Image: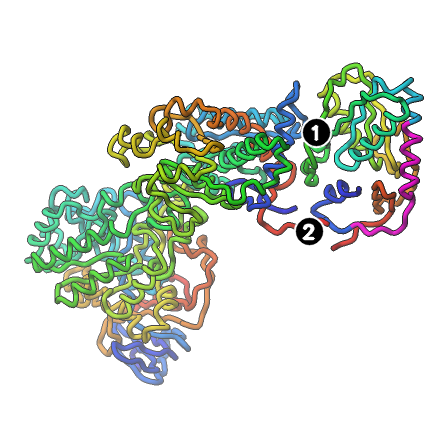
Amino acid sequence: MAERERSHTRPLGGVFVAHSQVLTATDVQRALTRMSHEVVERNGGADDVVLVGLQTGGVPLAMKMAETLRQIDGTQRLDVGSLDVAFYRDDIGLRPVLPEAVTDIPVDLAGRVVVLVDDVLFTGRTIRAALNALNDFGRARAVQLAVMVDRGHRELPIRPDYVGKNLPTRREEMVDVGEDGVWIGTLEDK
Amino acid sequence: MPDATLVIRGGTVIGPERSARLDVAVRDGAVVGLAEAIDPPRGAAVLDATGCLVGPGLVDLHAHLRQPGREEAETIETGARAAALGGYTAIVAMPNTEPAIDSAGVAGEVLALGAGCTAEVAVAGAITVGRAGTALAPLGELAALGVTLFTDDGAGVQDGALMRRALDYAKGLGVTLAQHCEDACLAAGGAMHEGSWSSRLGIPGTPAAAEEAMVARDITLARLTGAPVHFLHLSTAGSVELVRRAKAEGLAVTAEAAPHHMLLTHAAVAGYDPVFRVNPPLRTDEDVAAVVAGLCDGTIDAVATDHAPHAPESKEVPFDQAPPGMLGLQTALPIAWEVLSPHLAPERVFALMSAQPAAIARLTATDPRVGGHSAQGGPVELGAVANLCVFDPAATTVVDPMQLASRSRNTPYAGRTLAGAVRHTVLRGEPVVIDAVAQR
Amino acid sequence: MSGSRHLLSVSDLGTDGIAEVLRVAEAFAEVERRSVPKVPTLRGKVVATLFFEESTRTRLSFETAAKRLSADVLSLAVATSSVKKGESLRDTVETVEAMGIDAVIIRHSSAGAPHLVARWVERAHVVNAGDGWHEHPTQALLDCFTVRQVLAERKGVAPDELGIGCFEGLRVLIVGDVRHSRVARSEVLAYTALGAHVTLAAPGSLLPPSLEGWPVEVATDLDAALGDADVVSLLRLQAERGSGSFVPTLREYTARWGLTARRAARLGEDAIVTHPGPMVRGVEIASDVADLPRTVVTQQVANGVAVRMAILFLLLGGELPGTAEVPAVA
């Protein structure tokens, strides 16, 4: 799911070339299950929780997580939304940042616990933008952050609440997250 | 040639029929020697013309010098300097000044300002008072000053009856009426050629028919009155064909075409650059081909620049608000050479730019009056007035609007590499341009 | 992604660029549906509207778009500016640029005026908001956006899911004063770039003098053409531009070329009617027809803001996606 990073890297472009696999499909599912349990534990259930996947890498993860949460908590009612943060980024004009998809927040967030879900946590700028964006949808009681991979290199004081895997990387490397596993690699010229 | 004061060495002298490798010796404003090798006497000036064509000085039938009234765009002096740099030794100043040249007073002023310039300045008078198209200007009074060409250029005489009367009246005066052919109603509001580009660009167009309708009318009037008519700046295939038929019929019509109508098309307007707004407008590929064909087969008698300077700020407005016109004097010969020399012998190219326009403007014989013009249009022969244009067809120059002698910069050829360059210009024996540099 | 720095013509975008604008506009349409329809995207940027020809609707639409993107908006209306005092277009533009304006939205009665401005500015982006008879690119884009929205709604899918495939083979009939219409020129470029078939229907005197190079057909019988149309784009008879003298009388024009109730009955069940506004009821469109659900003028106005947000965002956020070389992204 390095698709977003790739598109954000335009006009450099390039092709993601995987060098090694760091998580298998089973590892990814296992991590999601663990994180879901942590969400339930920390929030005393999932009733107030709204999962918000960040476009585009976080959205399928949020869907998966919602499924798992429903099973764990036995609730049918679990709100899932998606958020595109392109309009809230602080690097507009520095590089083309295009919205990947339409934002869809199905409920008023006032009083709810929002769990932002993303595939990779890197500089923290996407999450900063997401926090700003969430403000426009109501005042959430709390915002928590779940990421499949935390690769370090933070540029802002942001830390995740739920982590699939801590993965030390070099800055120029790229991390690709999918349901079929997590790879580490580089962006090569086409 | 012991007494020559100027020798032009190494060039090929362009004759009316053929040319020959000859040096030219000049004294007292006249050609005094033509020989394969002339040793310049001590103290004589020498102009190197190796590889160059030495032809008669060019004659422009159509220059807007803007003085009086628009001196910020051009003056007679700067226009004459641009002319000299373009190889011209005589230019006809158009009468659409402010005030118009419609009286002996204004004509006399322009002639006086032209005396002593780097090119001889003849004057075209207006056909109607103030070029307003309603009452005849004093053609006879102007003719007495030596004015031989009359036109309301900038606009055509719309009233057919008035034009007919002018032609009848002019018959005894030994002058020629010249028409800017444009039916004002058909052309109303137009800012470019009406066609595929105007339709795409959303710019109001002037149809070719606006020009052709008046060419057709004036051919009919030439037939009716028997008076000569000169057609200014023909730009459409239809106009060229009308004139071709009129000449075949034996009518006393002549015609000119501007360099830009021999080369540029309405596609040049695509970027909305007002420098390409001109009247008549740049037209289609077919029209350009027809104009060139007309020059080649003798239908069109002369290349005339329609040099129309406009101050920079007046061209820094949207296309349809800009005044029409482009510079031409300094680029005409290279452009004509580029377009015509593949089809015509050098003698014919020079004839279109010198002898034939001189004949139309009746400048071929020296005017004996004080301050009168000298004989223009060649040929370069012993005893002739030394009005000469030395042209190097192998040289190239890149057009830089800032470097032109004109007060304005509205050349459509900015950045273009011209094939050939005017090297020296000699006016009545005086080298006014040496190595492409004006001497005064 | 590299493209044009300015939006002067629909042709600056190309097919892919139009598709991208429609896609991004969809994201802004979502923003508009929020209770706080404002995003901080262009905070600190300055957008100036330079309207040398008055148009309250288009200016308002652009200014709303800029404000919803959190840009600062300067509005220069000709009547109140120094332009009337003889300051040239060039001086005005230089003043505006000296003030550090990021985008100039220009409307002018002369075709090509935005092109001149684009040539003069060093850093500002230029958006053509209508120039003479030439183009009105954002109007055509919002027309396409609206048509896709209606088609998606009928299918019960999100407009994004339709992509631009829904335009392939769509039969668009542009009716009226094509000659003097910048909307028509932009629509022809936009619809045909998206794969639609465009037919023009107008009296000969209101067609452009030459249609050489226009990928369109011309219908001489409006009644016959109406039955085949999926989209009917009605143009205003621009009486203030002297179009009145191009037809004998308004009554005759309406009788032969207006979308009267009788004529509207010939339209297919699903045909959509668009109009760039303001409508002249009783001339090019009968009042009853203007109020039919198939007439989507209100949606067009609403969508104008989202589409203009997309244009400003794409220009100021980087570059317009254009036909200029686009580096491959895997």
Relative to B238, residue C13 above or below: above
Q: Is residue A121 left or right of residue C212?
A: right
- Which residue, given by chain and number where applicable, does mark 1 sit on? A103
Q: Is residue B62 left or right of residue A79?
A: left
Q: Residue at x 38, y 62 (%)?
A: B439
The chain ID associated with circle 2 is C
The front one of B436 and C313 is: C313
Look at the image and name its color scheme. Answer: rainbow
Residue C166 falls in which quadrant of the image? top right
Q: Residue at x 87, y 46 (%)?
A: A183
Name the residue type under label 2. Answer: Ala
A28 falls in the magenta region: yes
One can see residue B380 in this view:
yes
Cα separation, mark 1 vs mark 2, equals: 26 Å
One can see residue C102 in this view:
no
Estimate how packed mark 2 is, as few (under 14), some (14 to 19) or many (20 or more) residues with alpha carbons within 10 Å.
some
B425 falls in the magenta region: no
Estimate how packed mark 1 is, as few (under 14), some (14 to 19) or many (20 or more) residues with alpha carbons within 10 Å.
many
- Residue B387 badge: none
Relative to B94, residue A35 above or below: above
As drawn, the residue found furthest toward the bottom would be B36
Please report the bounds of the magenta region as a residue range: A16-36
Front of the two marks 1 and 2 = 1
The front one of C168 and B71 is: C168
